[in-house]
Image: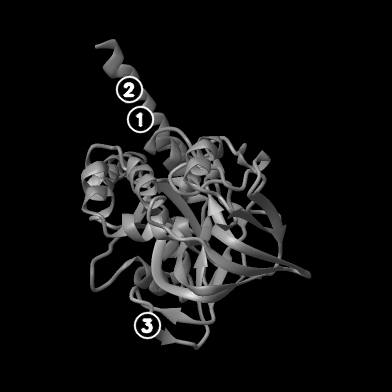
Amino acid sequence: DKSSRRQSFLQMDKKRYFGLWMKGNKMSVYHIVINPAGASGRTNECWDIIKKELDTIGVDYKVHLSNLEYGIKDIMKELTSTNERVNIILIGGDGSMNLAVNGIVNFEKTYLGLIPCGSGNDLAKSLGIHGTKIECLHRILNDQHGKDLDIGVLTYHTRYDEKGNKVSDEPYSRRYNISSGIGYDAAISEQVQRSPWKKVLNAIHLGKLIYLFVGARLIFLHHHFKTKIQIDDQSYSYDKLLFIATMNEPYEGGGFKFCPTANPCDGILNACIADGLGRIDFFRIFPYAMKGEHGKFKGVSLKEGKQIHIQTEQPVWVHTDGEVEYKTDSVSYHLMDEKLHFLGW
């Protein structure tokens, strides 16, 4: 029929256009990195759509599937341990992106694009990545230079396990794209990370709700703590800290705009500090955080700097892009000198 003929002509046009483009492009191979178990299997559904489009337009690609023995971090390390340019398309969410950026060896030669397929997708929301999976793919394929994004670095000076037993006092660093939080938001991430409800809600496309459910429950259980914070040459003391989120992007926690002015290209870290907030304050203020309007309330401070050090009176959970490894009572933050060449933004 007429509609089928029109679709056929459109596909022919796409093949012709991308055939000419790829012929003139020296780096014609794209490495597709996927966690098949991600988002309760939805990454596989996404890959089926992307694969069909790549085959239709004639793009040369290689697929890399992660598993428990050989994860995304390992795949990225292998792909980027070269002095030649490598184009990578990651299908996944914020956690997969965190693993990816922690695996990159040669940032100068690595060009990375993201097709969002996670529960929170805070990075995609912060960067304004929108549209269908195919539209995201085409933006990546049409972007040969990318934009340079800042990458945050968390350095543990002490590490403790979940029971508060010291694991090490040797420095240990982890990179992050979006944010690293200490205290309440990290405790939420730790609970979400091991909650069976995450898979259930992901399966019905309601993964963001798990953060709200866990957050509402933990506000009745979480304890405030004393903290000293050094931001560049300024020192601050807090007696009843709820959390501090050190951010490179505006959004975290499934859509909370904790640092509304955060810009991943400005070489500055932003921080949202919540101190002295009670349970009633939580339920009153947090709805405003969805729009980034929480800074007007007493007990909420928004700050920025290039170097941040945090000392707490007791070990508390820390997360990087929602991924939790250890508790700590001493951490530092800075931005890497290298930038992430991000495609499709």
Q: Amino acid at mark 3?
A: Asn
Mark found first going from the N terminus, 3 or 2: 2
Residue where numbered disc 1 is placed: 11
Q: Quadrant of the C terminus?
A: top right
Depth order, front residue of 3/128: 128
In whole angstroms, how far apart are the C-alphas of marks 3 and 2? 62 Å
In this view, which residue lies farthest toward the right? 233
Residue where numbered disc 3 is placed: 165
Mark found first going from the N terminus, 3 or 1: 1
Q: Secondary structure at mark 1?
A: helix
Q: Amino acid at mark 1?
A: Gln
Q: Nearer the viewer, mark 3 or mark 2?
A: 3
Q: Which x, y percent locates residue 199?
A: 23, 49
Q: Which x, y percent locates residue 247?
A: 58, 56
Tell me if mark 2 has few (under 14), some (14-19) or many (20+) residues whose alpha carbon lies within 10 angstroms of its own.
few
Q: Is residue 62 visible?
A: no
